[in-house]
Amino acid sequence: EDRNYPYRDKMLNDLVYRIKLKGFKKDSVLQLLGEPNRIDTNYFFYKVDQRFFENVPVPISTKSLVIKFLNDTVEWRKIKE
């Protein structure tokens, strides 16, 4: 909702350390996680958390789950802060 993702941070460790996303197809990732906030060639970016100064619309920090695809299959995923 808006710029809040209240459940993503709680899911992040499972997605990175417990669920084996490597080998998933893009369609399966989309079905599991929904549309990413940004797509860049072979990468999906899911915002997990953003911090803002009070009353300033520019983020001061962003935490994201990045998923890289090779031939429409997950090659790796990592947390970008």
Image: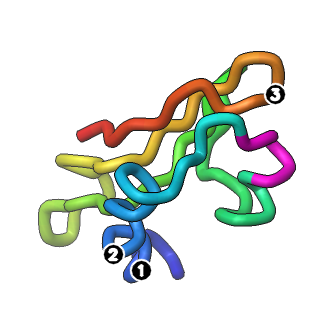
Mark 1 and mark 3: Cα distance apart in space: 26 Å
How crowded pointer 3 is (Cα within 10 Å; few <14, some 14-19, many 20+) is rated as few
Which residue does the image show at 40% across and 64% down from the upper left?
14
Q: Pointer 2: residues within 10 angstroms few (<14), some, or many (20+)?
A: few
**Closer-to-camera residue (12/38):** 12
Q: Nearer the viewer, mark 1 or mark 3?
A: 3
Contact (Cβ within 8 Å) of mark 1 with mark 2: yes
Residue 31, position in %: x, y? Answer: 80, 63
Q: Secondary structure at mark 3?
A: loop
Reading the image, the residue beneath label 2 is 10
Residue 22 higher or lower than 75, as above or below: below
- The dominant secondary structure in magenta is helix
Q: Residue at x 29, y 59 (%)?
A: 50
Residue indicated by mark 1? 7
CA–CA distance in space, label 2 to label 3: 26 Å
Which residue is the site of mark 3? 72
- Three-letter amino acid code at the position of disc 3: Asp
Which amino acid is tagged 1? Tyr
Spot occupied by residue 52 in the image (x, y as percentages of width and height): 20, 61
Q: Using the numbered discs, state the Cα–Cα distance from disc 1 to disc 2 in whole angstroms.
A: 5 Å
Start-end of magenta stretch: 24-28
Residue 81 picture location, percent across and down:
23, 40
Residue at 59% x, 27% y: name it. Answer: 68
Whether residue 44 sits left or right of residue 81 in the image: it is: right
- Is 25 covered by the magenta stretch? yes
* Secondary structure category for the residue under label 2: helix
Q: Nearer the viewer, residue 20 or 64?
A: 20
Q: In the image shown, does 20 or 35 lie closer to the viewer? A: 20
